[in-house]
Image (spheres, grey):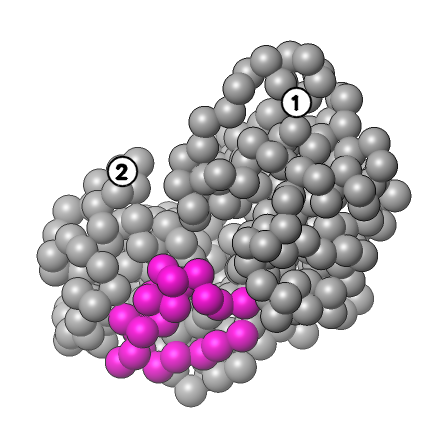
Amino acid sequence: MRAARCEVYGGPADIVVRDIEAPRAGPGTVLVDVAAAAVNFPDLLFIADQYQVSVPLPFTPGSEFAGRVAALGEGVDGFEIGDLVHGSVATGAMAEQVVAPVGSVSKIPEGLSMAEAASFRVAYLTAYHGLVTAGGVQPGQWVVVLGAAGGVGTACVDLAVRLGARVIAAASSPERLEVCRRLGAEAGIDYAAEDLKKRIKEITGEGADLVLDPVGDRWTEPALRAIRWGGRLVTIGFAGGIPSIPLNLVLLKNVTVRGLELRTWTQRLPEETARAREHLAELVAQGMRPLVSEVHPLEKVGDALQRVADRVNTGKIVIRISEEGER
């Protein structure tokens, strides 16, 4: 089968496409014919050997996929050959076939295309846990989303609006803020040109109720300073770098800071995750769709990864593995 391969640790330009041996379904796993695979920021960390866990060379990058069930391992129930599914793995998704644990695969909610399904599971589950499970968002509350035009950011904006929150999108250009406005953001802040803390205070009055932060870097502290007394900050990732924050701000403002790492959350919070997926499926039935901005063929996987590395994408970038993976 064809697969993207990381044969040396490095960057997007080092990823090649090879013919390799196809995998087989083992006990408790599902073999999927992949139609589409989404690009996520952790993919870049894996290929640079900068993730929390190192993956031995060579390996196939990609954590999020959609396709059709090709085979079922021993002990697997609930699926049939040909079922349309999406799922997540640590690595291995950017290939014509992938094997995933049965618990990491679910049927595609009706109405999603393959490209949308590949873009949905990780981003929207992260957004839901950030907003609801960790963030306790309520209708009418002010929610600030940093990195709001990216894959996770657009999911957070979209879902927060649908949950009745008042959303402030923070992104790095007017063009990217326009994407968020079309998703329903009430206000936008160009944090490359504006004072983030000052603008949040001006828009909200008392400060934000909740900040969702997939960026980190120098933006976390001003966002924290703009949270109202008793508000919350949920850190989702560090696309811009790991920040340092003064804990006296957390103490003086009675702010709750929560960390959200989806892999361990789904393992340790199965009931909350099941409720999240059920609610998300209901919203899909009502018309919710992930923003897929670009679809690249497998042969251009390096270009797709570089787009995410450069943080120029809006919404999700998808790798088309088969014809079904078209948007």
How far apart are labels 1 and 2 at the CA level? 28 Å
Q: Is residue 166 above or below residue 32?
A: above
Residue 256 is marked as 1
Quarter that holds the N terminus: bottom left
Q: Secondary structure at mark 2?
A: loop
Instruction: Using a 10 Å C-alpha cutoff, classify the residue at mark 1 as few (fewer than 14 neighbours), some (14 to 19) or many (20 or more).
Output: some
Q: Is residue 276 left or right of residue 104?
A: right
Residue at figure coordinates x 15%, y 47% from the top left: 56
Q: Amino acid at mark 2?
A: Val
Q: Amino acid at mark 1?
A: Thr
22 vs 138, nearest the viewer: 138
Residue at figure coordinates x 83%, y 31% from the top left: 206
Residue at figure coordinates x 30%, y 49% from the top left: 45
Instruction: Using a 10 Å C-alpha cutoff, classify the residue at mark 2 as few (fewer than 14 neighbours), some (14 to 19) or many (20 or more).
Output: few
Q: Is residue 34 above or below residue 222?
A: below
Residue 112 counted in the magenta span: no
Residue at figure coordinates x 63%, y 66% from the top left: 174
Q: Secondary structure at mark 1?
A: strand
Q: Residue 138 in the image: x percent, y percent?
A: 83, 38
Report the magenta residues as a range.
293-314
- State the residue position of label 2: 53
131 vs 193, nearest the viewer: 193
Q: Is residue 188 left or right of residue 44?
A: right
Q: Answer whether residue 44 is visible to the viewer in this image.
A: yes
Q: Is residue 286 above or below residue 128?
A: below
